[in-house]
Amino acid sequence: MNAELENTGIDQRSFEILPRNSKMQSADQQTQVEFNKVLVVGLGQIGLPVAKYVKEKGYDAYGYDISSKAMNIAEGASIKKANNFSEFDVYILCVSTHKQGDLFSPQIDGLLSVVERISTEAKTGALLSIESTIPKGTSKKVFEMLHHRLHVVHAPHRWYAGEEKKHGINQPRTIGGVCDCCLKVGMQFYGFLSDKNNDNRSLGIPMHPVTEIEIAEITKVVENAHRYLQIDFAEELYLYCQANNINFPELRDALNTKWNVNILEPRDGIGGHCLPKDTKMFLQSSKSVRSKIVLAATEVDQDYRRYRQKRGQQIRGI
Ligand SMILES: NC(=O)c1ccc[n+]([C@@H]2O[C@H](COP(=O)([O-])OP(=O)(O)OC[C@H]3O[C@@H](n4cnc5c(N)ncnc54)[C@H](O)[C@@H]3O)[C@@H](O)[C@H]2O)c1
């Protein structure tokens, strides 16, 4: 019997465990079954509720953020500050993935610098989960940087500020692993445990596993491109109504009486650090076939913004 697993209550028959602390080993045979210390990197809108949820589930929850303000808020919520990146069982990356000073453009330099640090400090066999939204191919790049010393999964977030209770941390999510062993370990951490002999904890989140990690990556950006299109159609319809002297709110109300129609409100144009950036990630994810409809939608959003700006100036008499 493996001495490390004695008295853990974990069914050892189904796992092959290699000695844990060698940094030279690959994680492929090491499907770690014990998660205790969890580090959440990036403690913003997503990372802070993730860290709190992890803590609520009974894990030893740590956090790290380059922003001292974010770190202080997390410490106020009893998330311990990580002074280094070693000896964690799980790393959850929730860092921003947009360019500094340009919310609408993707950039993963910050995320890769975190991975660089993890690659030198983490123990073999730990789990690294990317919850940030990332361009296709990022997870495999991360995996290569780690030389498969750690398991790598992507479990993109669907957290929604407007309805945190209903659409917060614990809601159905996709998950992909770079290798089968990565997915297996990721599912042990996130999902519901099906092995009755295994009384180890998990986050208890209903996960939808996919066979290729790229599917998990693309799922997230397509979800947001789809949302972008829905808002964009409302913007275009609004412009159409303005040009043809039609009352948009009345038309919208009438349309939405049909069971399968839901025209959204156009509001201020499509903003924030998610929809425009993720839609760009989707457009950039294919060189050969680029979505014509999404490309056109980005132009409509520009038209709508210009219209709003002009109207605003007219109203203010500028
Ligand atoms: N906010 C949402 O509703 C939402 C929903 C789903 C997915 N996402 C995705 O989750 C990711 C994070 O989004 P967010 O809304 O939490 O952003 P945020 O700006 O609120 O928080 C990101 C945090 O990461 C920190 N950070 C950046 N670079 C870092 C580094 N190198 N090391 C440590 N910390 C670093 C920042 O200081 C910040 O506190 C993004 O990829 C976003 O697209 C966000």
Image: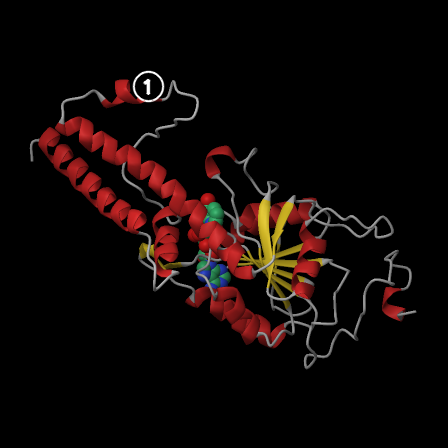
In the rendered image, the vertical position of residue 296 relative to residue 41, given as above or below: above
Q: Name the residue at 22% across, 47% down.
A: 299
* Residue 35 in view of the camera: yes
| Disc 1 crowd, CA 10 A, few/some/many (<14, 14-19, 20+) | few
Q: Is residue 181 above or below residue 171?
A: below
Q: Position of residue 223 (x, y in %)?
A: 45, 45
Q: Residue at x 68, y 79 (%)?
A: 23
| Percent of width and height locating residue 112 | 48, 69
* Residue occupying the far front of the picture: 289
According to the picture, the residue beneath numbered tag 1 turns out to be: 253
Quarter of the image where the C terminus is located: top left
As rendered, which of 312 and 207 lies closer to the eye? 207
**Kind of residue at badge 1:** Asp
Q: Quadrant of the N terminus?
A: bottom right
Location of residue 103 in the rendering, given as x and y in whole percent from the top left corner: 33, 53
Answer with left or right where residue 298 lies relative to residue 95: left
Residue 141 is left or right of residue 126, and the answer is left
In the image, residue 87 sits, relative to residue 237, either above or below, namely below
Do we see residue 42 in this rendering?
no
Task: Specify whether 1 is left or right of 90.
Answer: right
274 vs 177: above or below: above
Q: Which residue is pictured at 68% across the width and 76% down the height?
A: 26
Residue 237 sits in quarter: top left
Say which of 141 and 309 sits in front: 141
Front residue of 301/6: it is 301
